[in-house]
Image (cartoon, rainbow, N blue to C red):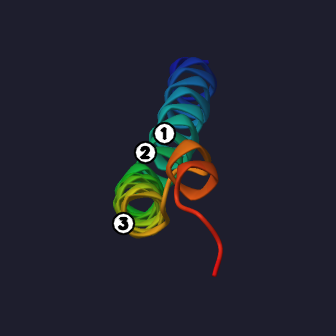
């Protein structure tokens, strides 16, 4: 009788341990992707800053519409 009770306890303990390991594995896998996502987000920010700088350079090089009207055409 004691061996049956001990088997049931160890079976229950093994099930709990297995469930805990499965949950821990899922958390580990889901948290592992944050580094890759952070890298992609950082690259997107860098690309956006570079595009803004290019756009600002393009607007600086172009003459204003008011200045173009003031200069007489030859």
Residue 7 at x, y percent in the picture: 57, 32
For label 2, the residue is 31
Instruction: Depth check: give the residue in front, 54 or 36.
Output: 54
Q: Secondary structure at mark 1?
A: helix
Which of the two labelled residues, at mark 3 and mark 1, occupies the earlier sequence position? 1
Which of the two labelled residues, at mark 2 and mark 3, occupies the earlier sequence position? 2
Asked whether the beta carbons under mark 1 and mark 2 sit within 8 Å of each other, the answer is yes
Quick check: 9 left or right of 45?
right
Residue 42 at x, y percent in the picture: 35, 56
Q: Quadrant of residue 3?
A: top right
For label 1, the residue is 27
Quick check: 39 left or right of 11?
left
Q: Quadrant of residue 60?
A: bottom left
Q: CA distance from mark 3 to mark 1?
A: 46 Å
Q: How many marks?
A: 3
Say which mark, if any, is on residue 71. none
Q: CA distance from mark 1 to mark 2?
A: 6 Å
Height in image: 71 above or below 16? below
Which quadrant is the C terminus positioned in? bottom right
Q: Secondary structure at mark 2?
A: helix
Residue 32 at x, y percent in the picture: 41, 56
């Amino acid at each position: 009788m004691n061996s049956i009770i001990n088997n049931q306890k160890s079976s229950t303990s093994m099930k709990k341990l297995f469930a805990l390991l499965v949950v821990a594995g899922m958390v580990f896998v889901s948290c592992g992707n944050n580094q890759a996502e952070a890298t992609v987000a950082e690259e997107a920010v860098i690309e956006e800053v570079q595009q803004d700088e290019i756009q600002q350079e393009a607007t600086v090089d172009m003459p204003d519409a008011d200045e173009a009207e003031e200069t007489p055409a030859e």
